[in-house]
Amino acid sequence: MTAHSEEETGFQGLVSALLEKGALTSEWLPACNAVPRHLFVPEVIWPGRAGLNRQDDRVIRGEEQEVWWAAVHRDAPITTQWDDGAYTGPGRGRIPSSSNSMPSMVFSMLDALAVEEGHRVLEIGTGTGWNAALLSHRLGSPNVFTVEVDGDSAREARRRLNDAGFDPVSVVGDGAEGYAEGAPYDRVIATASIGRVPRQWIEQTKPAGIIVAPWGPTYGGEGVVRLTVAGDGSASGWFVGSSAFMRLRAQRVRRTHVREYLGGRTWPANGTRSVTTLSPDEVGDWPAMFGIGVQVPGAFPWMESYDDGSYTLWLRDTAVTSWATADHEKGRGEFEVYQSGPRRLWDEIETAYRWWEEQGKPGFERFGLTVDADGERVWLDQPDQLVPVRRR
C-alpha cells in the first residue's frame, strides 16, 4: 500500500467516524473534505500514548511516518507546543500551550457557530490554522479574521494556510482584545478556554451575533457556551456540551505551591481536623467540577497520589489565604479533612456538591451564562434561576 493510499484510507475513516458521531454535518462536510487535517499538523507532535502502542509521547514525522499518520486520523487532540515553545524534547513538557483540537470538537463548535454566507468571523487562537482554513473554505478568506498570541505559531499557521490556498486576515496579538480593525463581526469563536468573557468580544460582535467559546471556572470543569449578543451590549446563552481546552494566556491562573500556603511548616500545620462522608472521588468528575466551580470562585484542586493507590486532594484559593486537604483511601466510608484559613474550602466544596446533587447532577446542557454590565452569572435551566455563589 502506498503512502498516498494510506492517507486516503485514514482520512476517510476519520470522516466516517465524525459523521457517525453526528459531529460532522452536511453543511461542513465539503470543507472537511477540501481541508484535510494533515495539512495543518506540524512535523513534530505529542499525541500521547493512548491507542498508539509506543513508549514516547513525542512523534517526529520523518522518523515515524505511520505513527504520525495514525495520530492525525484519530478523533483525538494533538499537542503541538509545550510551555509556550520552551520545551521541544521527548516525553512531555510541563504545560501544553498549543494544539490541533479533537476533530469532533472542532466540527461541533463550528456547527454551533451557525455561520451563513457573507458572515464575518473572528477566531481567537489560530493554533495550527486548521479551524481558520475550514472557515475560509466555507465563507471565503476575506471574511475570516484569526488572532494568535504566539508569533512562531502564527507564522507557521499562516504558511500552512497560504500553502492550502487560503489567505484570511492573520494577526499576532492578544486574543482577549479581539481585533477591532475588522469589527463588527457576525460570529466570534474561541479555541482557547476562558473563565470570563472579554468585553471586547461582545463589543466587536453585531447585535444578534453569536459567540462560541469554551468557558470554565477556576476549580475545573469546562463547557462550550453559545452566547447571543443583544443590542444593549449584554450576551446570554446555553452551554452546548463539555470541552477541555488550553486557557487563554491572558487568563491563566498562577498555581502557587502548597508550601506557600503552609508558611514553611509541615502539613497539617495549623489545619483543623474533621471527617466527611463525601468521597474526594465524587468531586473530581468533569460535570461535578463544573457544578462546584461555578459556585466556588477562586479555588482550585490538586491531587497528590501515593504508591498504594491512595491520594490526598488539596484545595487552595488563588488569593493564597486558605487551603484544605481530604485524604482518600479505597473502601473507606469516612475521609479525613484538614482546613486552614478564612475560607473553609472543603466546606465550600461539599456544600456546592450537595446543591449540584440535589438538582439531579445536571450536565452542561442545563446551564447557561449571562454577561452584562453587572458581570457574569451562571444559571440553571432558565436565566432567572441563578446558581448560588458560595464563599464563606
Image: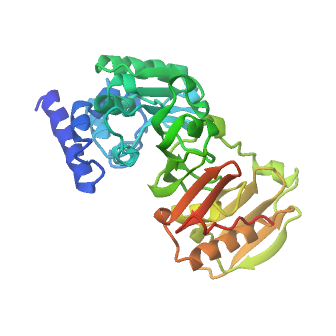
- Residue 6 seen in the figure: yes
Depth check: 311 or 233 in front? 233
Q: Residue at x 64, y 60 (%)?
A: 293
Quadrant of the image containing the N terminus: top left
In the image, residue 93 sits, relative to residue 343, either above or below, namely above
Q: Position of residue 39 (x, y in %)?
A: 30, 27
Residue 337 image-quadrant placement? bottom right
Farthest residue, direction front: 231
Q: For this view, does 375 lie left or right of residue 53?
A: right
* Vertical comparison of 88 with 219: above or below: above
Q: Between 107 and 381, which is closer to the camera in this rendering?
A: 381
Residue at point 53% right, 63% down?
367
Task: Please identify the quarter of the rendering in which residue 348 is found.
Answer: bottom right
Q: Nearer the viewer, residue 290 or 75?
A: 290
Q: Quadrant of the C terminus?
A: bottom right
Q: Quick one: 190 or 199, which is closer to the camera?
A: 199
Q: Position of residue 254 (x, y in %)?
A: 71, 42
Q: How many marks?
A: 0
Q: Is residue 243 left or right of residue 370?
A: left
Residue 116 location, x and y as percent?
33, 39
Image point (62%, 48%), residue name: 195
Q: Is residue 391 left or right of residue 39?
A: right
